[in-house]
Image (cartoon, rainbow, N blue to C red):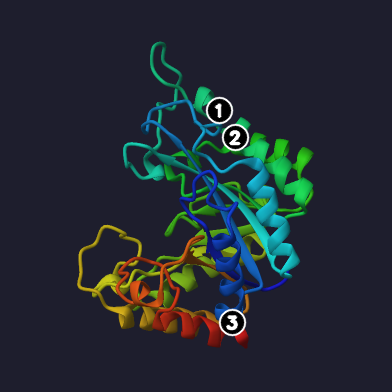
Amino acid sequence: MEFIKGITFGYMSQRGDWDTVAAKESLVLLKEKCAANTIILTVVVEQANPQSTTIDWQSETVLSDTEVKQMIHYAKSLDLNVILKPMVNVSDGTWRAHINFFDMDVPCEPKWSDWFKSYNDFILHYADIAEETGCEMFVIGCELVNADRREFEWRQLIHLVRNQYKGLITYNCDKYQEDHLKWWDALDVISSSGYYPIDRWQQELDRIEKVVDKHRKPFFFCEVGCPSRSGSEYLPNDWTKAGELDLNAQANWYKAMFAACEGREWVEGFGLWDWKAHLHGNESALTNEDYAIYSKPAEKVIYKNYKK
């Protein structure tokens, strides 16, 4: 596996957002300003609430198949590798990790079996697109913490995906879950969300290294990032954490993250979070307190590390 100098692109984009000149210009800037060799394309769909068993992946607001394919082809024309990452969110604002059902089927209650049927249809549709467009990697799920325990269903899905997609397959587990997932052996690559506190990187890497050694598979951080708020460097996973705008907090977090990972040869890349499909001007970027890295001090830290 080639070392992944990746950036997550276009999270929360809706239909038509990628079929624009602005989106393509944004992708060009991503490569130039970050020295990236990979983009992680996120296609986001929704279900109504954590106990809904229907995933509305064919909604009129979801990115069209045509624009997804066109963006993949455009990225490849720029010599970027592509990781396709379909993601499910919850419409009522609940984090996807809390999607959950009874372990045993109970009449008149929502069931894991019904949810996985809908989820499988969703994932297999994008596995076809990943195969057709030659994506280097396909992500079958992201941070579905309560669903992680459903080992049988995940192994079934992986088998089905392999019938349709011949590239590398991974699952993006949530932070602190790397040593809890029981089906890494069925995947090609181990990946996780590395939203770890600035002063905890060495301890967490020591823990993850044991998982990588056990399974002897490539590892990368499919998501990793920090907001631009004071204090967020100590709790980067909390996107709701209040704090004053602090661009240096984000930059310092990236410096610490890269420094910690540099001595770990088993860390084979990153999918930094994130880069918008439609960028605002430089002045707007400098007042953005979210995870975006465009035109912030963190961008220069990323370029320096990715360039080497």
Q: Position of residue 276 (x, y in %)?
A: 48, 62
Q: Quadrant of residue 92?
A: top left
For the residue pair 286 and 166, the one nearer the viewer reads as 286
In what element is the residue under mark 1? helix
Mark 1 crowd level (few <14, some 14–19, many ≥20, 10 Å Cα): some
Q: Position of residue 237 (x, y in %)?
A: 35, 62
* C-beta proximity under 8 Å, tags 1 and 2: yes
**Residue at mark 3:** 306
**Residue at mark 2:** 122
The quadrant in which the N terminus is found is: bottom right
Sequence-first disc among 2 and 3: 2
Q: Position of residue 162 (x, y in %)?
A: 75, 42
Mark 2 crowd level (few <14, some 14–19, many ≥20, 10 Å Cα): many
**Residue at mark 1:** 118
> Is residue 136 visible from the viewing direction of this image?
no
In what element is the residue under mark 3? helix
Residue at left offset 54%, top offset 83% = 303
Q: Amino acid at mark 1?
A: Ser
Q: CA distance from mark 2 to mark 3?
A: 33 Å
Residue at left offset 64%, top offset 68% = 38
